[in-house]
Image (cartoon, rainbow, N blue to C red):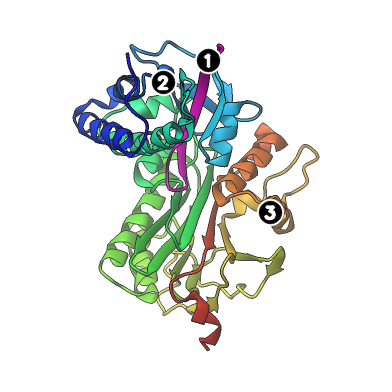
């Protein structure tokens, strides 16, 4: 098989053929199609599509008719994991003389799904950088297919699970948006643990023009009943949001929906926020929920603390909640969380606490971690404390405002 000439034409050929064939393939055939097209266009061999598990600890090679079962790779301590962590395409030594290995993150923006790895013959005309760019483009196309095809079959979900999922967790997994999303102005990265048995905690977000809508919820109880309560609250939230209702009306709609569903026996704490990504203006209301944290230049800003309204569904929140406002600075990180996170205990039964949470985030930012990588490190820290740390669901939503089109004038806004 003779590789095509390296360059833009080759990239266009690969992307066009991937899009065409992935559009028509079954979810279970994504790896087969990707490997076939990489072999055809680049003359690649030993192609592996790795997908990350839900825990974000290991990378699992997709089994296909072109790729045998591979050992599971931990993210830490190997070149494939390094590619996943860095989010950057890399070139390495091949398995034999005259070969090189190309790796590219399978990602959509900041949402990381895995790594594409392949071996090709080294190029005598020093065009390996062009081939690496081609592989990176192909990996992004594959990521979009994985995200899309996951809605139409179970194979790609099964590939990323390492244990059985409870009914409550299954319900929320089908309801919640992806754990990571990014635009030029804002990055959202979330943590929801224990991922296979969570019930009451949930989150939601939406990017609508210049406004990013954010919500973190904590329904009373555990398991499937708590997941149902969270589902009702999120459904009311989306219904109100999509009806262009403001925060006060949204709070009242959620209060009514949870009260009707729970008949006074169930409630949900929640924090609802809107971020204007052109100016950095943050508006939020709280229904019995811990206030968000603001990490700014390695310092903690506690100005977001407020007196919350009663939890949703109690019947005590029929009045209009107070809408608080604050202006963010480019690079600021907001941390929304549930109390299950700060109440995580180590082996000595010491609580993580708010200070411990902020310290973990501050250390991650000082090390230059991306926001998704920072949240992954936070998850690892929690799991490392002990399996018993999960006495309650634990959720965090970290939001970084990167600055907007009007960010340079934000300081002039009163």
Location of residue 394 in the rendering, given as x and y in whole percent from the top left corner:
57, 47
Pointer 1 with pointer 3, Cβ within 8 A: no
- Tag 2: Cα neighbours inside 10 Å, few (<14), some, or many (≥20)? many
Q: Main secondary structure of the magenta part?
A: strand
The residue where tag 2 is placed is 62
Looking at the image, the residue that sits furthest to the front is 125
Q: Earlier in the sequence, mark 1 or mark 3?
A: 1
* Mark sitting on residue 301: none
The residue where tag 1 is placed is 98
SS state under label 1 = loop
Q: Quadrant of residue 390?
A: top right
Is residue 73 found inside the magenta-colored segment of the image? no
Q: Nearer the viewer, mark 2 or mark 3?
A: 2
Q: Residue at x 60, y 33 (%)?
A: 82
Location of residue 27 in the rendering, given as x and y in whole percent from the top left corner:
28, 27
The residue where tag 3 is placed is 357
- Tag 1: Cα neighbours inside 10 Å, few (<14), some, or many (≥20)? few
Looking at the image, the residue that sits furthest to the right is 348
| Residue situated in front as seen by the camera: 277 or 284 | 277
Give the CA separation, mark 1 to mark 2: 26 Å
SS state under label 2 = loop
Q: Quadrant of residue 267?
A: bottom left
Q: Earlier in the sequence, mark 1 or mark 2?
A: 2
Q: Residue at x 58, y 45 (%)?
A: 373
Looking at the image, the residue that sits furthest to the bottom is 414
């Amino acid at each position: 098989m003779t590789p095509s000439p390296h360059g833009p034409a080759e990239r266009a050929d690969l992307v066009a053929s991937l899009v065409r064939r992935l559009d028509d393939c079954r979810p279970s055939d994504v790896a087969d199609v990707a490997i076939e097209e990489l072999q055809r266009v680049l003359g690649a061999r030993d192609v592996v599509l790795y997908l990350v598990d839900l825990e974000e600890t290991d990378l699992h090679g997709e089994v296909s008719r072109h790729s045998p079962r591979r050992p599971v790779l931990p993210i830490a301590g190997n070149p494939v994991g390094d590619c996943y962590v860095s989010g950057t395409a890399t070139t390495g030594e091949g398995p034999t003389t005259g070969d090189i290995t190309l790796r590219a993150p399978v990602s959509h923006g900041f949402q990381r799904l895995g790594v594409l790895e392949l071996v090709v013959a080294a190029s005598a005309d020093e065009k390996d950088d062009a081939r690496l760019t081609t592989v990176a483009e192909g990996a992004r196309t594959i990521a979009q297919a994985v995200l899309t095809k996951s809605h139409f079959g179970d194979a790609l979900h099964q590939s990323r699970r390492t244990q059985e999922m409870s009914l409550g967790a299954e319900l929320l997994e089908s309801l919640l948006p992806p754990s990571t999303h990014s635009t030029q102005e804002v990055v959202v990265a979330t943590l929801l643990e224990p991922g296979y048995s969570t019930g009451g905690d949930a989150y939601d977000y939406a990017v609508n023009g210049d406004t990013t809508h954010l919500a973190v919820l904590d329904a009373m109880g555990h398991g499937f009943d708590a997941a149902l309560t969270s589902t009702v609250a999120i459904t009311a939230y989306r219904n109100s949001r999509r009806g262009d209702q403001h925060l006060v009306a949204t709070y009242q709609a959620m209060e009514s929906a949870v009260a009707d569903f729970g008949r006074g026996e169930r409630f949900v704490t929640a924090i609802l926020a809107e971020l204007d990504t052109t100016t950095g203006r943050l508006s939020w209301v709280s229904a019995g929920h811990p206030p968000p944290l603001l990490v700014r230049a390695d310092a903690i800003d506690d100005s977001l603390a407020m007196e919350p309204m009663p939890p949703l569904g109690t019947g005590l929140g029929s009045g209009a909640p107070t809408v608080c406002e604050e202006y963010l600075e480019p690079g600021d990180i907001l941390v929304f969380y549930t109390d299950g996170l700060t109440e995580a205990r180590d082996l000595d039964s010491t609580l993580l606490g708010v200070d411990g949470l902020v310290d973990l985030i501050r250390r991650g930012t000082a090390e230059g971690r991306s926001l998704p990588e920072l949240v992954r490190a936070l998850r690892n820290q929690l799991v490392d404390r002990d399996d018993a740390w999960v006495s309650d669901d634990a959720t965090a939503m970290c939001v970084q405002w990167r600055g907007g089109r009007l960010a340079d004038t934000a300081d002039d806004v009163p």
